[in-house]
Image (cartoon, helix red, strand yellow):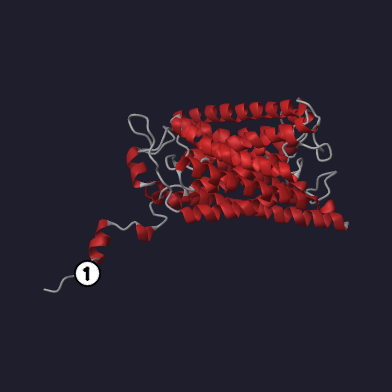
Amino acid sequence: MDTLFLMNSLWVMVSAVLVILMIGGFILLETGSTRMKNAGHIAGKTILTFGISSIVFWAVGYGLIFGEGNPLIGLSDFFYSGYDVEGLALSGSVFFLFQLAFAGISLTIAFGGFAERAKLGAYLVFAVLFSLIVYPPIAHWIWGGGWLAEHGKQDFAGSTVVHLTGAMAALAATLILKPRIGKYNKDGSANNLAGHNQVFTALSVLILWVGWFGFNAGSTVSVDGAFFGFVALNTNLAAGAGVIAAMIISWIVMGKADVPTMLNGALAGLVAITASCAFVDTWAAVLIGFISGFLVFYSIRFFESKGIDDPIAALSVHGTAGIWGTLSTGFFATPELATVGQPGLFYGGGLHQLGVQALGVVSSGAFAFIVSFILLTIMKRVMNGLRVTEEEEIIGLDMSEHGSYGYPEMMKTEKTVISSEPKLNA
């Protein structure tokens, strides 16, 4: 076994761990961006559904993506048993775990559309269906040698495969579930149901930012030439530009540097550069991230104005920024770096690659949304609804779904409060 094989395996294993740790970032992001009464539920269901997606990916997901089949789906390699893949210069088990982590992240993004109002059973069933029916076909089309790969679709680490797919499933969910109680007034104006902990949200962004080096740089699946360093550099520059742009636009429009907007700007920059991180120069990475910071600000307001309640801004951060990131390679991919597809418009490639990227956005986004909407509609009928009752939503999902609070010391009962009051001397 040669040294390069071992080094590649070690690098991708470290990257897989970083991507899986991003699940912790999403726990803090969704928890901090929502209300305290739902904190334990959000944390617990995220761990549980990642476990479900792991088993489904092992049983069938990996085979549907990377198995031998046709341009639409893979049809072999089910119940992966740890064998090495021919032609792959690293351990097959390591590559499997790396790809499993990506599938888990896309599912976690999709669940942003369920936040603060869905039954636990809806999470469990959709975790299986998304991991079986929604994510694998799109991943196969682009990463598994499917029809979009044959067209030269550029998506190095998943702006389309992971982020847009998850966001479109989240859009289907939030449309079916309807807004949270109290989000909109009778005249259609929106109320700010503020998250309970901006420190959690900021920490989540840092965890995700670091995890993204595994996400993007790890997608080189090789240490040869240390190209992963260049990919990591582009990733960091885009995130930095995104947070700066979001700060600028929020200060201009709102008169203050809004903290949630800045945090979303960083994430939008990371999502946008995910498709193009290996195909563009550093100056383009900065521009891609900067534009994403402006896009996410206006996208959040657009969805809110349309009555679409998106508690963690999944549609804007992962959907809008994912679309922009996917299209960006059609503009900025250089002849030297375009190892997949062709150079972008600004490098003499004409409109061809931009057209391929747009085709990938439309086909993948439409598939993820339509299939998710159909699955959720069927689930709603079979399961007697996907949403908790009004009383349960008001109480909070911690108590209604699990019988305990994520912050038990902060949710004292009336009896506890009375018994803890100081007694007056007679």
As helix, strand or loop, the secondary structure at mark 1 comes to loop
Query: In screen coordinates, is 272 left or right of 392?
Result: right
**Quarter-wise, where is residue 407 in the image?**
bottom left
Question: Residue sitting at 48 percent across and 35 percent down?
Answer: 301
Sort mark 1 into few (<14), some (14-19) or many (20+) by Cα contacts within 10 Å: few
Does residue 254 sit above or below 415 in this rendering? above
Q: Which residue is mark 1?
A: 422
Q: Residue furthest bottom?
A: 425
Question: Residue sitting at 67 percent across and 50 percent down?
Answer: 236
Using the rendered image of the protein, determine whether residue 53 is visible from the camera's viewpoint. no
Query: In screen coordinates, is 263 left or right of 6?
Result: left
Query: Residue 339 placed where, x, y %?
Result: 82, 38
Query: Residue 418 placed where, x, y %?
Result: 23, 62
Does residue 151 sit above or below 268 in this rendering? above
Camera-side residue: 325 or 262? Answer: 262
Using the rendered image of the protein, determine whether residue 25 is visible from the camera's viewpoint. yes
